[in-house]
Image: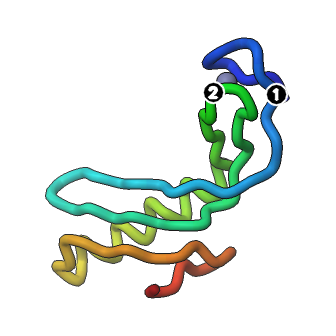
Amino acid sequence: MKCVVCKNGETKKGTTTVTFDRDGITLVVKEVPAQVCTNCGEDYVDGTVTREILSLAERMAKTGSQVDIRRYVSGAATPC
Ligand SMILES: [Zn+2]
């Protein structure tokens, strides 16, 4: 697809690192599948994947965990 940020590049399949930082929680998820712009490097993460990361952050909040770094695995992000 066409990149909406630089309006020049095309995106291609790749991976990115998603950082979630809210309410005192820092969650870093590596190797998240995304469409990455070949021109400016902007990444586009699928809505399903975003929801998985959000639910992971919610679980972190419940366990009182504040910082977590994980590698993305479809369906369940696992600890590094
Ligand atoms: Zn771009």
- 7 to the left or right of 54: right
Tell me whether circle 1 and circle 2 mark residues in contact (CB < 8 Å). Answer: no
Give x and y (percent) for residue 40.
Answer: 63, 27
Position above or below: 52 against 12: below
Q: What residue is disc 2 on?
A: 40
Q: Residue 10: which numbered mark, if any?
A: 1
Q: Residue at x 22, y 62 (%)?
A: 25
Residue lying at 68% horizontally and 19% vertically, measured from the top left: 4
Residue 72, image x and y in percent? 58, 73
Residue 36 against residue 52 in the figure, above or below: above
The amino acid pointed to by label 2 is Cys
Relative to 63, say whether 38 is above or below: above
**Earlier residue among tags 1 and 2:** 1
The quadrant the N terminus occupies is top right
- In this view, the residue in front, 68 or 6, is 6
The quadrant of the picture showing ligand 1 is top right
